Amino acid sequence: MLDRDGLTFAADELLAAALLDQDWRHGLDRLAEAAGAGGVTIIRFYDGRPGAFLSSTEWANADAELFSGHAPPSPRQFYPDSAFRNGFVTDQDLYTADELRRDPYYQEFLRPRGVFWHAKCRLHYGHGDRISLSLKRALKLGAYGHGDVAALNSVLPHLLTAGRIARRVLQAEATGMARVLQRPGDLVFHLDAKGWVRQAHDEARGRSTLPAALARVGAVDQARLASLDRAVMAAVGVPQRPALLALTDSDGASRLLNLVPIVGRAREVFCETAALAILTDPRASRGGLVSEFRMLRQAFDLTGREAQIAALLARGQSVARIAGNLGLQPGTVRTHLKSVLSKSGAHRQGEFIALVRRLIS
């Protein structure tokens, strides 16, 4: 039998993490311990395919291998939605012992890592997406029995509540960020962890790739499609990186696309929005150093001081002059510049200056 008190404590800790926007991994570690599991994974599926995931500490490396394709494929790796009507479901509810004995995922991936048996539940389902929680029990403990499933189902309402709260809180934060960043005339696209548009301006509404959504509003630049795809994947990938691209619309006018990652605890699975894509007409945002400061800070996720230094550098000021203007030591300015280059993806000051000048010209 499982530790019911331990399961309750773990479920309460996950609920607190959702309410307070804290790290979920400690609660997942507690849940794994109470359930006799070598690992716990929360997975978000997009149209039946696994996407973002969040793992307990001891199982994080194994999940990284699994979701990067370094594991034997298995049709039984992900349970069908129809299996979750009664709460937690186990391997033996769906598969025979012979099927498990012959399955390469179980035999070649799970068994060498000391785990084998699963108990899974569904935390969310809707609009083609599913969030599920998977417990991977230690091989030596044997399969989950009926009593174990009953114990797990006793804390399922807490787990479902935690997932529901996390989704709503984190999505509200993403929507709030979009409202803060959006200016009159801007188009804002919400991108999921696969880089697909999930929410957009009325003119570009409908689930699609970002290039397709931009094409529908006339902001298409065929020459930059490859760069756009790379920037989107960087914004929603691991680690997430902001990006700023200059595009040319169908009328030949310059447009600015700002990709802003939504990062933080558990956002990868519970927040539908992984990044925001903000399409701006740079001619409408000209206004001197203040506008440049705001643009740089938003585009590259800079601190206030970093954005100040970046804006002055882009205007041709030397490190010594910037230090004098801001009352800093030259070494301090260089430290901030190193961070600016890292966040922007530039390797040298000249490369960064050229990038910024193209964007504000």
Image: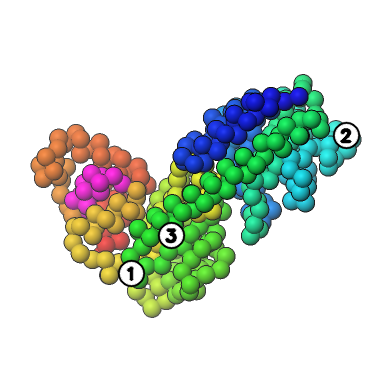
Q: Which residue is mark 1?
A: 184
Q: Is residue 307 part of the magenta span, yes or no?
A: yes
Residue 86 vs residue 245, the one in the foreground = 86
- Which residue is the extreme one toward the bottom? 251
Relative to residue 291, is residue 184 drawn left or right?
right
Give the residue type that dot 2 points to: Ala
Res. 97 mark: 2
**Label 3, residues with CA under 10 Å away: few <14, some 14-19, many ≥20:** many
Between discs 2 and 3, the one toward the N terminus: 2
Is the C terminus in the top left, top right, bottom left or bottom right quadrant?
Answer: bottom left
Relative to residue 102, is residue 358 drawn left or right?
left
Q: Is residue 237 part of the magenta span, yes or no?
A: no
Q: Tell me which segment is drawn in magenta.
A: 302-314
Image x and y of residue 208, in percent: 56, 65
Relative to residue 325, is residue 183 drawn left or right?
right
Image x and y of residue 352, in percent: 29, 50
Residue at 19% in and 34% down: 331
